[in-house]
Amino acid sequence: MSKCLKALALSFAALLVLTTEHGFSAPRQDGKKAAPPAAKKTGIGREATAKEIEGWNISVRPDGRGLPVGKGTVKQGEPLYVERCASCHGEFGESAGRWPILSGGNGTLKGHDPVRSVGSYWPYASTLIDYIRRAMPFGAAQSLTNNELYAITAYVLYLNDVIRDERFELNERNFMSIRLPNQPNFIDDDRESTEKEFWRKTPCMTNCVPDEAKITGRAQIIDVTPETGKSPKVE
Amino acid sequence: MAGTDRHKDKPAASRRTVLRAALAAGGAAALGRSALADAGNPANQPPNVPDWTRNLGDGVAVRAYGKPSKHEAHVIRRDVEWLTASRESSVSFTPLHELDGVITPNGLGFERHHSGIAEIDPADYRLIIHGLVDKPLIFTLDDLKRFPRVNRIHFCECAANSGMEWRGAQLNGCQYTHGMVHCVMYTGVTLKTLLDEAGLKPKAKWLLLEGGDAAAMTRSLPLQKALDDALIAYRMNGEMLYPEHGYPARVVLPGWEANMWVKWLRRIEVGDQPWHHREETSKYTDLLENGIARRFTFVMDAKSVITNPSPQAPLRHKSGFTILSGIAWSGRGKISRVDVSLDGGRNWRPARIDGPAWDKALTRFYYEFDWDGRELLLQSRAIDETGYVQPTKNELRKLRGVNSVYHNNGVQTWHVHKNGEVENVEVS
């Protein structure tokens, strides 16, 4: 054994002793679950201050937890929306081009071409104010004041016929009175019961389908695959 | 640069590259190319001695960070421009048909960004854990690296992978139909380790994971998964994460939809209920035919695809010994078997799995056969260790309709023409 290898082997042995001593053996990929890392505190990191948390904690929940303090009416929201949102989402939330739609589509969810908008699909209004606050306008995230945020949110809800009075002022106290119509139509993942048939003891191996396979659809007919020229350039 | 005088073969070589690139991208350009591409330049072939055998090449460290041969320049992520309005909120696809084995190179794993790539200075990276914990904590990147490390190889698949195919065959190439999946080795700290450090309050049930990008991407995660096998990773395939994959730290949730694997992770809030944020209500919910939508469909069902041949990688021989190659994976565990069919699902035979068949990781399969030169309707179906058998697309549609967008794991059919060209089709 070369000197180098010997040193390596030695340090390996030392490592083995160390890992068992400290109990730092995590579950392994081969499925055998060894003991998880010790629950003992390491003291790594430091306590986060209330101010640090406040600066980053922008999440809002359906029960109203996290709503910022602020207020704004539909009327105040309209010019703000037109200025900062309409170029992409359309004047009435109908979408300008291929940007996401924000309104419409009521009654389409069972149809062939469902439109999933705030009014037709979203279960909670809290999602809207949370999302606008964290991500919109696209390219200028977290640039709205809390009052602008409430005004624009109220306006988007107005475009969706959820708020009907232009003079309505949305604020952190009355926010919880807003209900979206599609909320009851969500269920938790039930695949393991409703799709039980996909767990098959003996998958068929021969003559599984009567008659020869017939081609029922072709990608080339639709022809939407990108061509070489349109792909990203490589230097 | 060394060897500027050695490109006598340039015309032929560049022609070949162009043809290969065309083939890789479109698949439709397959015809008539094969003879030319295979021929190359006789001046470089025996009995002649090519320039690269006579002249010195680049020295060490000229290529300080190596990259693939210039002849492989067509092996890249590609996007579908008509899909989205902007590249900052879009997706690019892994070139599955150009890869083998089970590990995806770091530069080729598909991307999905909601507001572009956040370029984070590691010195300014911070991760805050707060909410229902004994002590809210803030970590630097160096802090994260001081915790006990684990290494895990897992596939990462977007729930919208194959989402364009619900209504029928659309895109011609497995890069586009199945390329929102990749598989790398992650190094990081278990999320449980970090939560133990902060100390969970008894009411803790859900976590909110939040990214530091301009979408401040959020997802709610059940605590059970967080304590089971979730990681906060900072390395992929040994290197630090690439920016497009969440540098310097991201979430890894083995077997669960990629949207939850929040990149550029900046905050973990511990709570007692889910947040119902945009990515788990407006998006990543699965609309069924009756207008009801499933939510929190986290697990990726077992799936497989034949990567070669496929529309971007046609068969270049007319008949004879032929290798089918593909990948299979399951969010519920290990792949136990993969079957292939040459006749559109009438008859099946087990494929040969080669290489590791790890828990919730890509698994490589092959099927070797003697091709008689006739048309083929190729399919593969994955079976995982829970006994789940990958369904056909029609079986899926029967249960879910065609409006789900997400979680399309139906069996893929490739039609191999007599000339070796391959097309994405659907069969009865």
Image (cartoon, rainbow, N blue to C red):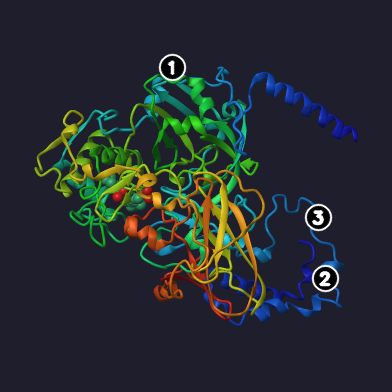
| Residue at mark 2 to residue at mark 3: CA–CA distance | 16 Å
The quadrant in which the N terminus of chain B is found is: bottom right
**1 vs 2, front mark:** 1
Residue matched to label 3: B59
Rate crowding at label 2 as few (under 14), some (14 to 19) or many (20 or more) other CA atoms within 10 Å: some
Percent across and percent down for residue B250 are 51, 38
Asked which secondary structure carries label 3, the reply is loop
Give the residue drawn at x 47%, y 41%: B261
Asked which secondary structure carries label 2, the reply is helix
The quadrant in which the C terminus of chain B is found is: bottom left
Percent across and percent down for residue B82 are 39, 64
Give the residue drawn at x 52%, y 67%: B347
Percent across and percent down for residue A57 are 37, 29
Q: Is residue B83 visible?
A: no
Residue matched to label 1: B134
Query: Would you identify the image quadrant in which residue B353 lies?
Result: bottom right
**3 vs 1, front mark:** 1
Percent across and percent down for residue A59 are 33, 33
Tell me if label 3 and label 1 are in contact, CB under 8 Å.
Answer: no
Query: Would you identify the image quadrant in which residue A74 lies?
Result: top left
Give the residue drawn at x 56%, y 17%: A40
In the depicted structure, whether residue B207 falls above or below residue A230 = above
Rate crowding at label 3 as few (under 14), some (14 to 19) or many (20 or more) other CA atoms within 10 Å: few
Give the residue drawn at x 29%, y 32%: A61
Q: Amino acid at mark 1?
A: Asp
Tell me if label 1 and label 2 are in contact, CB under 8 Å.
Answer: no
Q: Amino acid at mark 3?
A: Gly
Mark nearer the N terminus (3 vs 1): 3
What label sits on residue B51 in the rendered view? 2
Q: Is residue B298 left or right of residue B58?
A: left
